[in-house]
Image (spheres, rainbow, N blue to C red):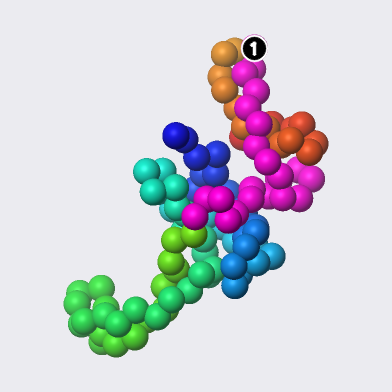
C-alpha cells in the first residue's frame, strides 16, 4: 500500500477541526497511513528537560493526520484533487492531477 502524498506536497484537510486549512507535509508514515502537516492538528505535549528541550514544560507539536482526511493540492490548477498515475514513454510512473491531467512531479 503506497501513499500518493509525499513530503513537501501541499495538502488540504477534508475533515475534523482543521477542515479547509492548507499545509505542507513534513513527514509521511506509509505503514500507518498517516501524515504530519506543518502547523495543523497541533497538540500540547508535556516534555521533561532534555538536550533538545533544555527548559522542559509544555510544548506545541503537530500530531499525525490519517491520509483519508487530506487531499493533495495540484500545483498547476491550485485545487484539491485525486491522484492518478501515468506511465511516461521512458517507462517512469508519475503522479497526475485528475482535474487538469497535468503531471505533478
Q: Can you see residue 104?
A: no
Residue under the image location 71 percent in, 36 percent down: 97
Residue beneath the point at 57% across and 22% down: 93
Q: In which quarter of the image is the C terminus?
A: top right
Is residue 51 left or right of 94 when viewed as pictured? left
Residue 77 image offset from top left, x and y in percent: 79, 45
Q: To which residue does mark 1 refer?
A: 89
58, above or below 27, in the image: below
Image x and y of residue 10, in percent: 62, 53
Q: 92 or 51, which lies in front?
A: 92
Count of picture labels = 1
Q: What are the residue bounds of the magenta stretch?
A: 66-89
Q: Nearer the viewer, residue 54 or 43?
A: 43
Give the position of the N terminus as an image quadrant. Answer: top left
Q: Does residue 37 appear to the left or right of 89 in the view shown?
A: left
Q: Residue at point 49% right, 59% down?
A: 65
In the drawing, does residue 25 fall left or right of residue 52? right
Q: Horizontal and vertical percent for residue 73?
A: 68, 50
- In the rendered structure, does residue 83 fall within the stretch colored magenta? yes
**Residue 76 visible in the shown view:** yes
Amino acid at each position: 500500500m503506497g501513499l500518493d502524498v509525499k513530503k513537501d506536497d501541499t495538502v488540504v484537510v477534508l475533515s475534523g477541526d482543521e477542515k479547509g486549512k492548507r499545509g505542507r507535509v513534513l513527514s509521511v508514515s506509509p505503514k500507518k497511513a498517516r501524515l504530519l502537516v506543518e502547523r495543523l492538528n497541533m497538540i500540547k505535549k508535556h516534555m521533561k528537560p532534555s538536550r533538545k528541550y533544555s527548559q522542559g514544560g509544555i510544548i506545541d507539536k503537530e500530531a499525525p493526520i490519517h491520509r483519508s482526511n487530506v487531499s493533495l493540492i495540484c500545483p498547476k490548477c491550485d485545487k484539491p484533487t485525486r491522484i492518478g498515475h501515468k506511465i511516461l514513454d521512458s517507462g517512469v510512473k508519475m503522479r497526475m492531477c485528475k482535474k487538469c491531467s497535468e503531471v505533478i512531479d
